Amino acid sequence: MSKSETILEVRDIRVVRGGTLLLDISSLLIQEGKVLSLIGPNGAGKTTLLQTLSYLQKPFQGEIRYRGQTVHSNHSVIGYRRRLAMVFQEPLLFDTNVFDNVASGLRIRRMKGPEIRNIVEEQLARFGIAHLGYRSARTLSGGEAQRTSLARAFAIQPEILFLDEPFASLDPPSRESLIEDLELILKQTGTTAVLATHDRLEALRLSDRIAVMKDGKMVQVGSPEAVMNYPVDEFVASFVGVETILTGEVKKQNSATFVASISGSEIEAVGQIPPGEMVFLCIRPENVTLSTNASKETTSARNVFPGKIEKVTSLGPYQKVRLDCGFPLVAYVTHHSLEKLSLKEGKEVTASFKATAIHVIRKKEP
Amino acid sequence: MELIFEGIKKAFWLVVTFDPEVIGITLLSLEVSGIATLISLLIGISTGVAIALSRFPGKKIVVSLINTGMGLPPVVVGLFVTIFLWRNGPLGFLEILYTPTAMIFAQAVIATPIVMGITLAAIQQLPPKLRLQILALGATRLQMVWILIKEARLPLLAAVMAGFGGVISEVGASIMVGGNIKGYSRVLTTATVMETSRGNFDIAIALGIILLLMAYLINLVLTHIQQRERPR
């Protein structure tokens, strides 16, 4: 990964409202051209952090340094804010047509007509809404409205783009296509972005780094792999680690499936991905079957691995079993199977899962 | 029935022959209420927006006072404006009692809380996050206020209608501070009161019809603008 410059630096910021500590972050660096995701449950402080970083939420204690310089007086706050853009969960469009909405940030900057037209048309095309230019914003669907909102943000060519749960209120199909487009646009434009989300798969897909937040604090900041596979504590583990997430390189492409190498083991999953690409493989614990002797039970599962039980935790109706198969793997089993197979820590078992049960995410190129 | 029919006939003639007195009264009505509405828009919108956007202790009390003010009885306004403008009253030195200026003053007092109250409600019903979005787009505080006013333009048109409609039809304050002086401070409402009390129903009906017609025409224009802006 190439070294990139720090565009924003946070030092010891604290936000207190009505006697409640909403945010308490000792240090956070935002690197130019990279996407940082803030993940955490509701109330973790993601929105507060975004609004503090964009100086929309005041006052706070501590320091925010933009390219090494502190943002001070009211005058420089406007100048600073004009280098940023923010997209919220709600599109928050103005009561006018799509074109004027996308142009609004440029008009606020007193840009002239012909220049505005060029930029707006470029953004409309980029977000696939060129045909909606003269439609009233009130008649748009949720997906179209959020595209307009994103186009409005990109029109001002922000140095940092803040995204506060931008996909959270979209229906699955429009959400999927917007994430896909945004992923590409972020890559093409090399925009620095900070994305707040409660969806870790969304974070995995879009970000270079992930920061896990809880109660206004940073619990863990690191690469997606590090956060997903090596959570620092129980909280991060429970928040990000509902399923096993493995990183690997695609080795071979078959007709409908591909084989990826994960720390020496080969896993087969469904998808058309060329060899050489890096992927995340997400395996839900309920899709992993355990047996004590693989040869006795025939299985249609493509992926069969011997492993050793590291830990068994009770989760009410299920038992969560953590295995070491050369890579970490989590399985859920019922009490009944636990007793029948007499599973306990240290025991050797065979884990199997189908190629179709793996959720594949193509890894963002560094 | 005869009385009404005769009245309408007379009214029609007064209008189509451009009776100079009726025209004079109508124009003065428009002038006084128009200027009073303009003043109330300036004060009402700016103050209404300022209150809607600021947070201060006692805001609820202020808002409830403004809402009460939306229904100020014109005679009460007339009474207090008269006291203020009375020769030895606090504003007596202005010597404007029984002039159209005094009527504008009183009508502006009546219309301002109406405009302010509707503005306040209009700005407050915009999504709270919209302000953050506007600031995040790089707006200065002044640009933000301007954009919010544009966003609330439809309810603000209602404020114009309500303000103008309130003052052009009120009679209590106008008669008290204007004095209903012929050719000087006589407006449609005060003239209607006087002609009715004299039993000149035909002229009273004519004036009443003109008053209705004017209120209707102005609201027609504003409603047209408002409906054109509505989502289809």
Image (tube, grey):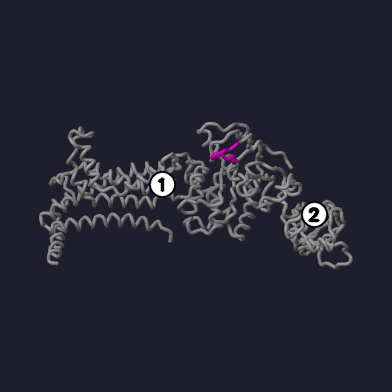
Q: Quadrant of residue B224?
A: bottom left
B121 sits left or right of A208 in the view:
left
Gap in Å between the C-alphas at discs 2 and 1?
61 Å
Q: Quadrant of residue A66?
A: top right
* Main secondary structure found in the magenta portion: strand
Residue with the mark numbered 2: A312
Q: Amino acid under label 1?
A: Ile
- Is mark 2 in CB contact (under 8 Å) with mark 1? no
Q: Residue at x 53, y 55 (%)?
A: A145
Q: Amino acid under label 2?
A: Val
Nearer mark to the viewer, of 2 and 1: 2
**Callout 2: 10 Å neighbours few (<14), some, many (20+)?**
some
The kind of secondary structure element at disc 2 is strand
Q: Position of residue A46 (x, y in %)?
A: 61, 45
Q: Quadrant of residue B97?
A: top left
Residue with the mark numbered 1: B149
Q: Where is residue A92 in the image (x, y as percent from the top left)?
A: 51, 51
Q: Residue at x 38, y 52 (%)?
A: B155
Q: Give the range drawn in magenta.
A: A14-22
**What is the chain letter for disc 2?**
A
Task: Tell me if I can see residue A296 in this picture.
Answer: yes
Q: Where is residue A316 in the image (x, y as percent from the top left)?
A: 72, 58
